[in-house]
Image (cartoon, helix red, strand yellow):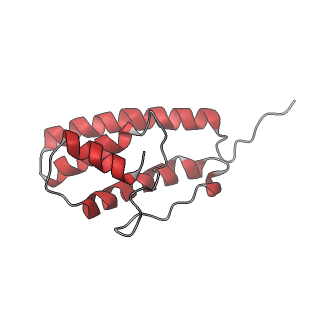
Amino acid sequence: MTLAEAIAQADETNKNPYTVKQKIIWLSRCETLVKNYVIDAHEGGETVTFSGYDENTPLETVLIMPQPYDECYIHWLHAQVYYANDETDRYNRSMTMFNAIFDDFKGFYKKNHTPKGCGRFRF
């Protein structure tokens, strides 16, 4: 999923007045979580480069989490909109969905990548 696709899908299901620039900033925060708490916690994390997104980032930039976990980005954007609108119940529901899918992604990533400091057993 690209930045443009995430923003378009989130906007299609949750009309809002926030700018593309603001949504890119929100997605950058989400990607920071993905990079810092999942990718960098595993061997090979240094091969995934991410230094943040801003208004100059191409909208065709591919986000880190693959399908089917990329739905996280939609829930994340919805949650940010609800938070900005002070809609606590809707924010909580969106974050619950985000966290469930994000946890699934973390499990998938851990199953396919060696956590740092664990090494692999050798016989």
Residue 8: x, y in percent? 28, 47
The C terminus sits in image quarter: top right
Which x, y percent locates residue 78?
Answer: 24, 44
Write the residue at 38% across / 53% down: 3
Q: Position of residue 95 (x, y in %)?
A: 28, 40
From the top left corner, tell me how far across and down residue 109 is, in percent: 56, 38
Q: Is residue 103 left or right of residue 12?
A: right
On screen, residue 86 versus residue 37, left or right, reads: left
Counting labels gives: 0
Picture quarter with the N terminus? top left
Residue 78 shows up from this direction: no
Q: Identify the residue at horizontal 59%, vertical 55% (top origin).
A: 48
Residue at the top extreme of this rendering: 123
Tell me: 90 left or right of 108.
Answer: left
The residue shown at (15%, 46%) is 15
Q: Residue furthest front?
A: 60
Q: Residue furthest right?
A: 123
The answer to whether residue 77 is seen in the rendering is yes
Q: Residue at x 58, y 49 (%)?
A: 41
Q: Looking at the image, which is closer to me, 94 or 71?
A: 71
Q: Is residue 55 above or below residue 72?
A: below
Q: Say which of 71 and 59 sits in front.
A: 59
